Image: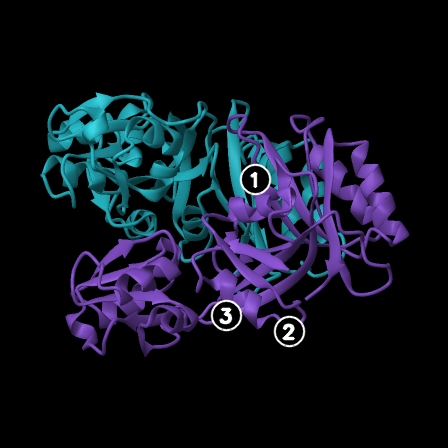
Chain colours: A purple, B cyan
Amino acid sequence: MRAAFLGPEGTYSHAAMLADPRAPACDPLPLGSVHEAVLAVETGAAERAIVPIENSLEGAVGQTLDALAVGTEHVTIVGEVVHPVRHALIARDEVELGSVRAVLSHPQAAAQCAAFVRAELPQAVVVPVASTAEAVRLVAEGRAPAEPAAALGTPLAARLYGGVVLREGVEDGPGNETRFVWLARDAPPPAGGGDHKTSVVWWGGGDETPGWLVRCLSEFAFRGVNLTRIESRPRRLGLGHYMFFADLAGSTADASVAEAVEALRTQAETVKVLGSYPAA
Amino acid sequence: MRAAFLGPEGTYSHAAMLADPRAPACDPLPLGSVHEAVLAVETGAAERAIVPIENSLEGAVGQTLDALAVGTEHVTIVGEVVHPVRHALIARDEVELGSVRAVLSHPQAAAQCAAFVRAELPQAVVVPVASTAEAVRLVAEGRAPAEPAAALGTPLAARLYGGVVLREGVEDGPGNETRFVWLARDAPPPAGGGDHKTSVVWWGGGDETPGWLVRCLSEFAFRGVNLTRIESRPRRLGLGHYMFFADLAGSTADASVAEAVEALRTQAETVKVLGSYPAA
């Protein structure tokens, strides 16, 4: 079974895939973007994908939500896993932190370690790179724009590319974790009654009229279906037009959830059930 | 009057500031981050700030929402302006597009021009830089990693740093625009009745109970107050805890808006009115 994820190997997506105790054994299929990982499931190029959907500090991962909402018809969320984000400082060789002249990382990781970098790497210029794993690879291969260089990334990437972990857990705040979802093609919902979640997205059909969003959400509240999360994303029709993502407690195999989703279809132009799956 | 914004000079924030016909004359105060620009108003280091809050393609600007919600007590939204995002291709001198070997830009701008770069600059490697203005500055000063080089940024930056605009409007899709808000310290709300918006943020006090968000939103719907936007952001207490930002039609000088906000205070632990201001 092939599992697609945002590559190269050694990203947090890859680390989350390896760390999930409930995951089946998979061959890694690293791809160039979250969007490509989602499409790999849609087209059958991969049987599974694991993609980040939400971070406890940064919020929603817009690319993932957008890819799930538009342009896919067969992609189903079949599971979720919460993985801690702990950044390591990685170099090619052992080096004095104060002498580091370039810190490579994904801009989000760099932002999460900003206080550490200011305090411990005062000489370093932050160099944005497409992913934390790419940052580690560049540093380990001696291809950074200035030397000595270090990267902020996963210990997994240090192992894969031959870097040295100088320091672990260099993020500024505690409690940084990312929720990932597992995707498969056309998976049926799990039987109701267990501890499940259902993810839906809807848009259009009245979003400019007063109280429309409340009417949509009332379809859940009215049936005692709890929302664990709601997120809005632009519909790319210009400012002021949004799609709404919600996570509901329960499976679409539960009558209350199924009825609420059907009722939502009377309020919104498009309602897409992204999947029902066991809660993490 | 000093106006703080995400620097260096020549960013889209700076361009939006200069383009706003309703803005007072301001001395530019470019700062290193959106967060610093917001804090400059809080501390009085600047009388105004202009910060991006929402993009029509990328969605909410989390850094801005977070800075407005937490850590500030005196910052008030006093206006908004919608500014088109039109990327220009800028070089040090006139150059054949096909010969360009490096394209510098902020990763978001580079992503928005990806098809153009593939088609017209087939030789070019994309080099991520901290801001579009920084990209233009590096190219204009001949400090790009390969030559000939070009940057994706604002014509304003080309003027400021001495670059040549090779092509304007090189973004792949139309309709890319960003909404910015103007900030001031402890500004009173405008008189009611006009075409105003009010921005609020709230959190806590029941967000784990079924239907809580619907009850909060119903306080607006019940009084006929329309929501033009809702956005959730993590409260940084771990996954599952959110704060909610809403833009309401009307000013807090309008009775219906004022009553809805007071009613919301009975539902949520914290309710913060970010400001009432003329709609763009």
Q: Is residue A159 shown above or below A134?
A: below
Number of the label disc, if any, that sits on residue A64: none
Report, in whole angstroms, how far the alpha carbon at label 2 lies from the one at label 3.
21 Å
The type of residue carrying mark 1 is Arg
Q: Mark 2 sits on what residue?
A: A21
Q: Residues within 10 Å of mark 1 (few under 14, many from 20)?
A: many
* Residue drawn at (57%, 62%) of the image: A27
* Residue drawn at (21%, 42%) of the image: B134
Q: Position of residue B257 (x, y in %)?
A: 61, 36
Tell me: B266 left or right of B42.
right
Query: Judging from the image, what secondary structure is the residue with disc 3 in?
Result: loop
Report, in whole angstroms, how far the alpha carbon at label 3 lies from the one at label 1.
25 Å
Q: Are marks 3 and 1 in contact (CB under 8 Å)?
A: no
Q: Nearer the viewer, residue A214 or A35?
A: A35
Quadrant position of residue A65: top right
Q: Position of residue A234 (x, y in %)?
A: 55, 35
Q: If the image is split into quadrants, where does the N terminus of chain B sit?
A: top left
